[in-house]
Image (cartoon, rainbow, N blue to C red):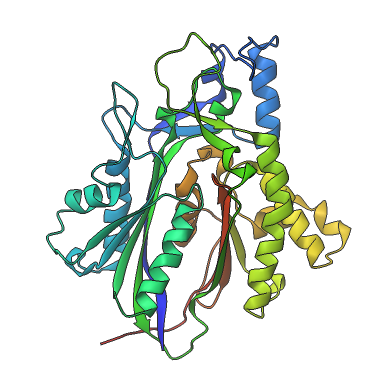
Amino acid sequence: MIRSIITGTGHYLPKKIIKSNHFLKHTFYDKKGLKINKSNEEIINKFQKITEIEERRYINNALFNSDIATIAAKRALMNSKIYKEKIDYIISAHNYGDIHPISFQSDFMPSIAARVKNKLQIKNRKCRPYDMIFGCPGWIEGMILADQLLRSKYAKNILITSSETLSKVIDPHDRNAMIFSDGAGAVVLSAIEIENENYGIICYDSQCNNNEELHYLSNGPSLNPRYKKSLVNIRMNGRRIYEYALTEVPNMLKSILDHADLHLKDIKKILIHQANAKMDYAILKRLLKLYNYSSSFFKDKDFYTNLMPMTIQKFGNSSVATVPTLLDLILQGKMPPHEINPGDTILMASLGAGMNINGMIYRFPTTTQQKT
């Protein structure tokens, strides 16, 4: 039986650490374009209490989105021990492409995947580059597409990258700017002949609500009418996203588990998109309620963090990169006491612009045999 198996992982975290005091000199405006009549200390403290973000990472000005995607890709290829010319597809998840350093406009042509292939110096003309523009769930959606290609025998090895440089598209006058960060992750997914069909990618689903939800995350001018540096600034309706996430995500995740004939107790780790700590905890709480967990679990912070590892406190929200970065950190033993062992089953989930949500169940194989 051919299964889609993760054969390599990698990530890139910028070295530049941005602490909350970075925003003390900012001038924040509300949605009406009026200066917020509160001290920055009050604004920052309230933000940190809700999101738990203490630090975030920004790339330096010499790097582009495609550069950090390539760094993560090289690390995943090295970890996989698969020769780069054996890669049949590159699927690159992102939302803004490379940001021009002067105009601050998005650059999508050529595609990020094509640029990653070029920077990896892959000569194979049968290595096809695809971009996945799917909001923050883009990397999981890229994994879903890759699984379908591998199962259809159109490919044997696929590189899925995820990268974003949101520090280049934030509005410095918007409080939400403190959420976003930069980073990249990558995975090599391979078609492996394996005896037990219940290993590798087991089950997944996606849901796209693109009516009024379409504008919960979008682009727009600065909240400060006098700020003209860029017309491409990420704009977020946090309340609507929070309400949508709590309504839709837990139900979809339970549906995926039900379809795989699994219970939440079968899951070793939940790797959820690092968007907002309060929201992620609330999603897990709703999921626990669907399984009739007792109320004692809801107050046990250790239970939450053991089941659902968090990186947002130190790395912020790097969009498509949060889940694969989290996965690689655990697999490389860089997030103790968290660990994933052969035979463990994990649930990965994300939501973002669109609104799009998705989830995937993956079980790590105990033994594998490469298909000849």
User: Is residue 231 left or right of 372 when viewed as pictured?
Assistant: right
User: Is residue 15 left or right of 115 when viewed as pictured?
Assistant: right
Whether residue 62 is visible, yes or no, is yes
Find residue 278 and report its image quarter. top right
Residue 197: percent from left, percent from top:
49, 86
Whether residue 349 is visible, yes or no, is no
Residue drawn 38% across and 45% down? 163
Find residue 338 and report its image quarter. bottom right
Q: Is residue 270 above or below residue 168?
A: below
Name the quarter where the C terminus is drawn: bottom left
Which one is in front, 55 or 214?
Answer: 214
User: Is residue 51 left or right of 197 when viewed as pictured?
Assistant: right
Residue 174: percent from left, percent from top:
57, 21
How many numbered marks are there? 0
Name the quarter where the N terminus is drawn: bottom left
Q: Is residue 175 above or below residue 94?
A: above
Residue 43: percent from left, percent from top:
67, 19
User: Is residue 164 left or right of 19 when viewed as pictured?
Assistant: left
Q: Is residue 124 above or below residue 326?
A: below
Residue extending farthest front: 211
Residue extending farthest right: 295
Find residue 7 and report its image quarter. bottom left
Residue 166: percent from left, percent from top:
44, 34
Residue drawn 63% across and 9% down? 35
Q: Is residue 98 above or below residue 257?
A: above
Residue drawn 40% across and 20% down? 230
Which one is in front, 285 or 101?
Answer: 101
Residue drawn 42% across and 84% down? 367
